[in-house]
Amino acid sequence: MEKLEHLLEWGGVKKDVACLVLSGIALGMSLLHFRPFGLDTAWIAIALCGIPIILEAIIGLVTAFDIKADVLVSLALIASVIIGEIFAAGEVAFIMQLGALLEDMTVAKARAGIEKLVHLTPRTARRLQNGGEVIISAEQVQPGDILRVFPGETIPVDGVVVSGQTSINQSVVTGESLPVDKGPGDEIFSGTVNQFGSFDMEATKVGDDSSIQRMIRLVQSVDAGKAKIVGIADRWATWIVVIALTAAALTWLITGQIIRAVTILVVFCPCALVLATPTAIMAAIGNATKHGFLVREGDALERLAAVSCVTFDKTGTLTCGTPQVNAVVSLHRDWAEEEIYRLCASAELRSEHPLGKAVVNSYKNGSCEEIQQPESFQMIPGQGVRAAVGGREVLAGNRELLTKNHIELPENEGEMAGKYLEMGCTVIYVAVDKVLAGFLALSDTLRQEAPDTIRQLEAVPVTPVLLTGDHGAAASYIAGKLGIRQVYANCLPEDKLLRIEEYQNGGRQVCMVGDGINDAPALKKAYVGIAMGGIGSDIAIDAADIALINDRIRELPHLFLLAKRMMVTIKCNLTFSMTLNFIAIVLAITGILNPVVGALVHNAGSVIVIVNSAFLLNWKKRGETHKP
């Protein structure tokens, strides 16, 4: 169905372009006085471009008494035809339809983000009853039901773990960069993914009360509330129509010359005014594309220029989104850090836990030595791993693993690990032959360009804010490295919405930058949403107004300054077009301009507006030298 809609939409664009090309050729032939069969070819432009304008104006007036710019255009067209100025009528119709096409081309296609969210909802659940398992529809799950979830499966409803140990990828709901270990009594959310280990759970929130369904409703509600910006010509249309009709009527009554009245209607047609905004937006979108931005909403840059606060998700946006080993610490004089790292990587080689895989990948990327295969391996859910490496017993895991194996962690050594925990790291302790050797600290890595990006954004100026589902220590550490002073941690999707709403209710327009499924409601709620297109989820991209395809966040300051520059260009275009209009009106009242010359003046004004907008295509911010 989506493909069919896309084809129909594309077919409509091709039809409009074809009509404009034929109309342009017809007007050229009319200007050269080429009259096949004695017919003025400008009638072709009137038929292809003018009649749709007249019909739309009539429908708007009859159904909703909606006065737009097309009302004045229709009056000018009809009046020009009545007095025999066919070329003037066709030329005005052509310019207006060209502006409408440019405006339509800046409007994004229909998005399917909500449908993709719906597809995340599990269709079935495995309910325990009568000593066995029964596969049922997820909609049939009732609070209190005991469900079993296998490795790799998506959790069907919200609930509490009853038995079993596992690790859950909660990025859908919280955006946390690292999976979270879960055991009996821990809360789990629908839509999140069980990484390994089967477990039993008791259903607590089902149906529309589940986390994933609440997120769907959030996206739907905030999408419906985001208003579109109305074109400046349509915003002023009522006044333009009233002034034009009044001026034309008075001129006709005073001079008795209807041609002057018609000329006033023709020159009053807001051709350049209609082109002023969409041409600048299209040129700015072309510039943004060169810098890796896909602008999905036509008015997104117009809104971005008014933004005073930019909120960032942490994981995958300001950070790379994948855990890496950033420190290896020896706690025993007999063990060097390199040896501890090697033994831990060997012990984790067969691990299915995401942290174990991160240790192995980090070791492979940073060491020339091959990882030694363990002679034996045991996964201990919720604690870590036990392995035999080179004839030694290696334990790698959390403090609970040390406690269960009667390995003491001296207070001063625990404080050393605590410093890394305060920095938002996850610590894996390593014991060899029942003796604590040291630990590895893993964390999400900060993007190299992130600090400079934040500094440049503050110079725009916009205020950076960190909104993350990660815990307070990780959030505060990253914010400190970046110089971000406003930080909100442990944010669920609802919390991010609340923070953005607070800013916007306080008169500050917000731009949200995020990458995860959990960011989709916030991207919709914000005045402008920017999604990380390279590593971001399809749902986040569909929810956003702009996608950063290459994930190079260093381009964000350029985008903000480009939006402001675009608004300057639009204001210049509007000022010029209005000034030209009023000069032309004075000349029309005095009889210096006739309808044809008036139409040509408008044509020249439209060309000047387009040329001025085109300068945005290659605009660069001051000091910018690198190639995008």
Image (cartoon, rainbow, N blue to C red):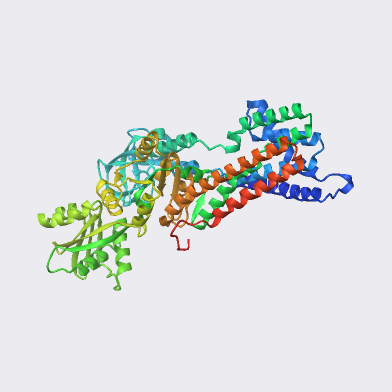
Q: Quadrant of residue 48?
A: top right
Residue at (32% x, 64% y) in the render: 361
**Can residue 372 be spotted in the picture?**
yes
Location of residue 379 in the rendering, given as x and y in whole percent from the top left corner: 26, 57
Location of residue 118 in the rendering, given as x and y in whole percent from the top left corner: 46, 41
Residue at (20% x, 67% y) in the render: 337
Q: How many marks?
A: 0
Pick whichever, 188 or 73, lies toward us: 73
- Compared to residue 479, the image places residue 78 above or below, namely above
Location of residue 290 in the rendering, given as x and y in whole percent from the top left corner: 52, 58
The quarter of the picture where the N terminus appears is top right
Pick whichever, 365 or 574, lies toward us: 574
Please state if 450 lies on the left or on the right of 540 as rendered.
Answer: left
Q: Check the image and name the residue furthest to the right.
A: 37
Residue at (43% x, 60% y) in the render: 623
Q: Check the image and name the residue furthest to the bottom.
A: 368
Pick whichever, 530 or 519, lies toward us: 530
- Compared to residue 372, the image places residue 124 above or below, namely above
**Can residue 54 be spotted in the picture?**
no
Location of residue 582 in the rendering, given as x and y in whole percent from the top left corner: 64, 38
Pick whichever, 197 or 556, lies toward us: 556
